Image (cartoon, rainbow, N blue to C red):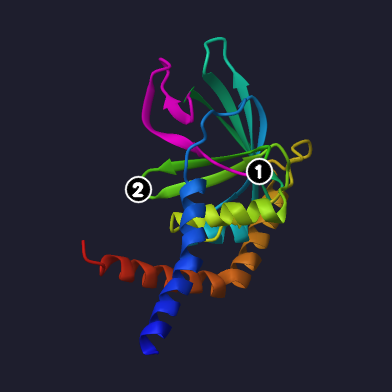
């Protein structure tokens, strides 16, 4: 009887784990072909470190990317626009697309570095980008300013498959017609005061995040190689 109980337990665990592993196998596969990248893409969410979690909660940002195709095939210019507490900024760049990979390029249009890889997603108007540097960076972009709960849940599963934290959903305020200037001293004072109050409000959760991260790192470093 004891043997039968153990066997039943093993089978039940297998039935739970198998779908999860199959989901990860599918969700971590690169797309066969990248979609048309031209146009506007809103940054919806990304898994973050404790520091970025603090920044997102103290000064919740919103980002979107304007992508323009060049005359040379597979080359694109982009403008990243950011808004934090009514303060706005932007940054320009260029990238090269090769199937499901996106490479940074230099001033001579020569691709370099480790590319971003576009992963599978069930969201019909989204792209999920994975960048590997020292750590995985996973980002979901959409043509919409918000995605459905089911689409966000799938992205959370992708992050979990890579061992990343639960994604932080960014703000969806993309009105850049009425931005405050950094030269506006009154606006900057309001901005800093708001930051300080939110920092006080989230200190407890940030400390918890660092504690949990330390535990995870300790478990990781103690694993045999």
Q: Position of residue 49 (x, y in %)?
A: 47, 58
Q: Position of residue 139 (x, y in %)?
A: 55, 45
**86 vs 20, nearest the viewer:** 20
Which quarter of the figure is the N terminus placed in? bottom left
Contact? badges 1 and 2 (CB < 8 Å) = no
- Position above or below: 45 against 105: below
Q: Is residue 67 left or right of residue 47?
A: right
**30 vs 127, nearest the viewer:** 30
| Residue 110: in magenta span | yes
* Crowding near the residue tagged with mark 2, few <14, some 14–19, many ≥20 C-alpha atoms within 10 Å: few
Tag 2, which secondary structure?
A: loop
Q: Is residue 171 left or right of residue 1?
A: right
Residue denoted by label 2: 134
Front label number (1 vs 2)? 1
Which quarter of the figure is the C terminus placed in? bottom left
Q: Position of residue 121 (x, y in %)?
A: 59, 43
Residue at position x 58%, y 27% in the image = 78
Q: Is residue 219 visible?
A: yes
Question: Along the polypeptide, which appears first: circle 1 or circle 2?
Answer: 1
Tag 1, which secondary structure?
A: loop
**219 vs 54, nearest the viewer:** 219
Label drawn at residue 123: 1
* Crowding near the residue tagged with mark 1, few <14, some 14–19, many ≥20 C-alpha atoms within 10 Å: some
- Position above or below: 30 against 85: above
| Residue 154: in magenta span | no
- Position above or below: 27 against 99: below
**135 vs 197, nearest the viewer:** 135
Dividing the picture into quadrants, the one containing residue 221 is bottom left
Residue extent of the magenta highlight: 98-123
Dividing the picture into quadrants, the one containing residue 204 is bottom right
């Amino acid at each position: 009887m004891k043997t039968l109980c153990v066997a039943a337990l093993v089978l039940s665990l297998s039935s739970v784990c198998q779908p999860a592993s199959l989901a990860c196998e599918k969700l971590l596969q690169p797309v066969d072909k990248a979609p048309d990248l031209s146009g506007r893409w809103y940054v919806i969410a990304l898994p973050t470190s404790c520091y970025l979690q603090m920044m997102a909660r103290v000064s919740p940002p919103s980002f979107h990317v304007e992508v323009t195709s060049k005359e040379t095939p597979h080359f694109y210019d982009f403008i990243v626009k950011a808004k934090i507490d009514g303060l706005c900024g932007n940054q320009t760049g260029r990238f090269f697309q090769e199937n499901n990979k996106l490479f940074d390029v230099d001033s001579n249009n020569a691709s370099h570095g480790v590319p971003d890889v576009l992963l599978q997603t069930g969201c019909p108007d989204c792209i999920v980008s994975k960048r590997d540097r020292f750590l995985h960076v996973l980002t979901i972009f959409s043509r919409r300013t918000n995605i459905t709960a089911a689409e966000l849940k799938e992205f959370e599963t992708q992050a979990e498959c890579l061992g990343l934290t639960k994604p932080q959903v960014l703000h969806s305020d993309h009105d850049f017609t009425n931005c405050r200037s950094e030269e506006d001293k009154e606006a900057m004072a309001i901005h800093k005061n708001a930051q300080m109050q939110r920092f006080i409000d989230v200190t407890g959760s940030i400390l918890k995040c660092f504690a949990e991260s330390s535990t995870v790192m300790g478990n990781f470093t103690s694993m045999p190689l």
